[in-house]
Image (cartoon, grey):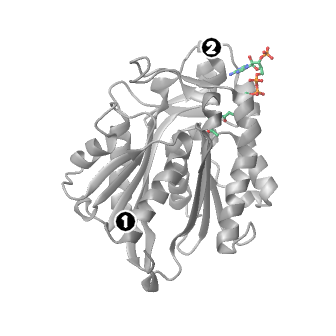
Amino acid sequence: MSGIRSVTRGIGSYLPEHILTNAALSERIDTSDEWIVQRTGICQRHIAAEGEYTSHLGLVAARRALEDAGMDAQDIDLIILATSTPDQTFPATSATIQAELGITQGAAFDVQAVCSGFVFALTTADAHLRTGAFRRALVIGAETFSRILDWKDRGTCVLFGDGAGAMVLEAIPESEANGAGVLTSHLRTDGRHRHKLYVDGGPSTTGTAGHLRMEGREVFKHAVGMITDVIEDAFAATGESAETIDWFVPHQANRRIIDASAQKLGIAPEKVVVTVDKHGNTSAASIPLALDVAHKDGRLRKGDLVLIEAMGGGFTWGSALLRW
Ligand code: ACO
């Protein structure tokens, strides 16, 4: 395993065209822009069009990441898609994306760790690349959470949005990486909390897709502690710290969770990349979407040290440090 580094070669994202503002939502349900912004920092979210599926979102993000990397789809031999909203129960939505990209070599599979999905997928891709079994991976987070929301439940439907982000990772000899690549990652799950954030359906239970259910206060109570624990693990493993990182790109669930985590860790507010105001919580897509925003607006530069983290249903949580 040693001697190989997974380095970032490209990043891309896609948001569906339709924007649903808080004002538009408050015409449908008993809520207000003020309540949503104050509690979550969310102002708007994107919603997939009828007939626009998770694979469509992921495919566009993947194509944009390949373009950013200057690579052809045929350069890819591993696709890992993080999603909790697959097109179908099976085959994996990554298989659909693989076929649409015209790739027939290598492997494609989905991982399911809800909002932590991208950190889990990145860690899985990094582990596979470092075995030498694969050369170049597309790591995608793509979600259509609008399809599993109960639009009558104001406690949950205001929080989420649809979108996708993708990253191209390449395995290269560590001696050629100049310190770049995935430096460390840390994954955790504690299934005792599985009833606090879940979907009340599934193929083996109800035979339906179900709707998202959440004990919001319980999630909030655990989030900051879990997030900061796993980030401290990343700092301990690498000797890096809140001072040495250039960018903190957290899962975009809620502005209050992001701010409280950054504050507890001593991360300066200007290092925190925030997109939750415009995207809402796009679950596994939120981190690559935020990375792409910071890449496109010029904040994220080659050589920067980037800390990512997420926490979600399960509970699952995880962190990773990357040298861009
Ligand atoms: N608009 C107006 N009022 C609302 C809304 C809404 N959209 N939703 C709930 N309320 C009302 C409730 O009915 C309640 O009214 P009551 O006092 O008359 O009963 C009141 O607001 C307070 O409700 P709470 O649920 O206690 O509100 P809270 O302050 O906890 O905020 C929230 C709710 C925003 C969901 C918060 O708990 C939270 O942010 N939790 C974290 C959840 C999260 O981010 N989940 C994302 C998935 S997990 C992840 O990605 C980490």
In terms of secondary structure, where does tag 2 sit? Answer: loop
The residue beneath circle 2 is 29
Q: Is mark 2 within 8 Å of ligand 1?
A: yes
In terms of secondary structure, where does tag 1 sit? Answer: helix
Identity, as a three-letter code, of the amino acid under mark 2: Ile
Identity, as a three-letter code, of the amino acid under mark 1: Ala
Q: Ligand 1 is in which quadrant of the figure? A: top right
- Expressed as whole percent of the image width and height from the top left, the position of residue 236 reads 70, 69
Q: Label 1: how many residues lie within 10 Å, few (<14), some (14-19) or many (20+)?
A: some
Residue at 70% from the left image edge and 25% from the top image edge? 33
Q: Nearer the viewer, residue 287 or 86?
A: 86
- Expressed as whole percent of the image width and height from the top left, the position of residue 225 reads 75, 48
31 left or right, relative to 96:
right
Placement of 44 over or under 115, stated as above or below: above
Q: Label 2: how many residues lie within 10 Å, few (<14), some (14-19) or many (20+)?
A: some
Give the total of numbered labels. Answer: 2
Which disc number belongs to residue 69? Answer: 1
Placement of 98 over or under 242, stated as above or below: above
Rendering quarter of residue 216: top right
Q: Nearer the viewer, residue 296 or 30?
A: 30
